[in-house]
Image (tube, rainbow, N blue to C red):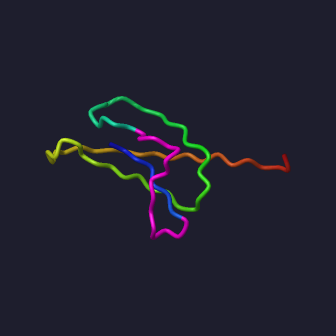
Amino acid sequence: MIQLQQSIDGENWFTPKTIGDIETSLTLQTLQGCYLAPICVRYIRFKITELTGIQTGTVVNLTLSLQKKFGGD
């Protein structure tokens, strides 16, 4: 399972109630996308949990992209 966690100070982390689990099955081998907004804190991290309790050679590659709005609108 993949969850987004947020922090204001980089030390105290919480899972926001308004954003559900990003992924509940780590068995997918296809490219997945997810749009997360708004994120109103300075720090984010992803918590990845193996649900079965079996330690396997699972590799998860995460790529983040950021879009900023420029201008006075």
Q: Quadrant of residue 59?
A: top left
**61 displayed left or right of 12:** left
In this view, the residue in front, 8 or 29, is 8
Image spot of residue 52 (x, y percent): 18, 41
Q: Magenta residues, as a range?
A: 8-22
Residue at 48%, 34% in the rendered image: 33
Residue at 15%, 48% in the rendered image: 55
Image spot of residue 42 (x, y percent): 58, 62
**13 displayed left or right of 49:** right
**Residue 20 is one of the magenta-drawn residues:** yes
In this view, the residue in front, 14 or 2, is 14
> How many numbered marks does the figure carry?
0
Residue at 34%, 37% in the rendered image: 24
Looking at the picture, does residue 55 appear above or below residue 22?
Answer: below
**Residue 27 is one of the magenta-drawn residues:** no
In this view, the residue in front, 54 or 66, is 54
